[in-house]
Amino acid sequence: MGKFKITDIDNERFYQIPKSLFTNDNYKGLGSDARIIYALLKDRMSLSRKNNWKDENGDIYLLFTQDEIRELLDVSLSTVSRAMKALKKYDLIEIVRQGFNMPNKIYIRKTVVDRHIRTSQFDTSGQVNLTHPDKSNLHTNDTDINKTEYSETEKSIGIRQPKQLKHNFAEFVSMTNDEYSSLIETLGSEESVKACIEILDNYKGANGKKYKSDYRAIKAWVIEKYKKEFKPSLKQNVNKSNENPQMEMARKAMEMIVNG
């Protein structure tokens, strides 16, 4: 590759590491690997925002496994594991287990400096009104751009996309995190996706069936089966809830009289 020229436009993307991780005494001994992974996790929040991955408190969480981090950074799994433990020790992340074969939820905690800064407020025009003077000249990073736009841009300039790993979401069902999030967008809720995964898992376990892509199998026939199985029961419940309570009490009273 050639050297940079004065007229060149810098189109590179960057991971942003908070300066406080280097300058604040609270983070002495954190380690370079942990600092880099923290920046990687913060960048990953864009995908969580896009998929509306938040809990009942509105807190954003990530679905990002240590295997994915290891492959992206080209380091050993033990290196990633040590760095993640360091981030937990320094109160920079929180990990919540979801259960058997489900990816852990990762919550990113703010740095000490960030915790003393009031939350930014948005006006109706969509502009950010920052309440701290030191934040007035910040530039947004590229996590706000649609992920598909990144992909197409990187393909055009020859940047190799890291291969996405598949994860077990059930005993016989595996897919990438992006495929999982795509199903959430299609079905509208994570509960519906889990129900479809259970249907496919039971089918494959009972019949010894294998698919090249469990994600495509769910899109091809499982979703339709899920809708047929669950919609009638939902409709029945709605009809029951719409019954007149007084009529229901009268019906039960008549049954008691008839039955003596």
Image (cartoon, helix red, strand yellow):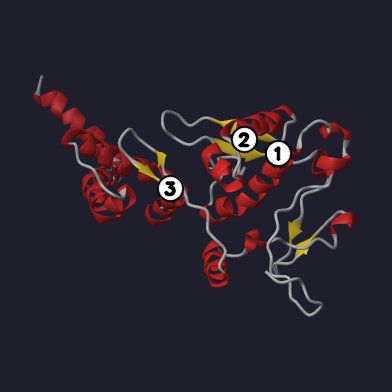
Circle 1: element type: helix
Q: Position of residue 147 (x, y in %)?
A: 55, 62
Let me know if residue 69 appears in the view.
yes
Instruction: Report how far apart the C-alphas of labels 1 and 3 lie in the structure.
Output: 25 Å
Find residue 229 and report its image quarter: top left
Quadrant occupied by the N terminus: bottom right
Mark 2: amino acid: Val
Find residue 197 and report its image quarter: top left
Circle 2: element type: helix
Among the two numbered marks 1 and 2 on one chain, the one whose residue lies closer to the N terminus? 1
**Residue 50: mark in rendering:** none
Among the two numbered marks 2 and 3 on one chain, the one whose residue lies closer to the N terminus? 2
> Badge 3 is on which residue?
176
> Badge 2 is on which residue?
80
Among the two numbered marks 1 and 3 on one chain, the one whose residue lies closer to the N terminus? 1
Mark 1: amino acid: Asp
Residue 136 vs 163, above or below: the answer is below
The answer to which of 158 and 190 lies nearer the viewer is 158
Mark 3: amino acid: Thr
Question: 10 Å neighbourhood of mark 1: few (<14), some, or many (≥20)?
Answer: some
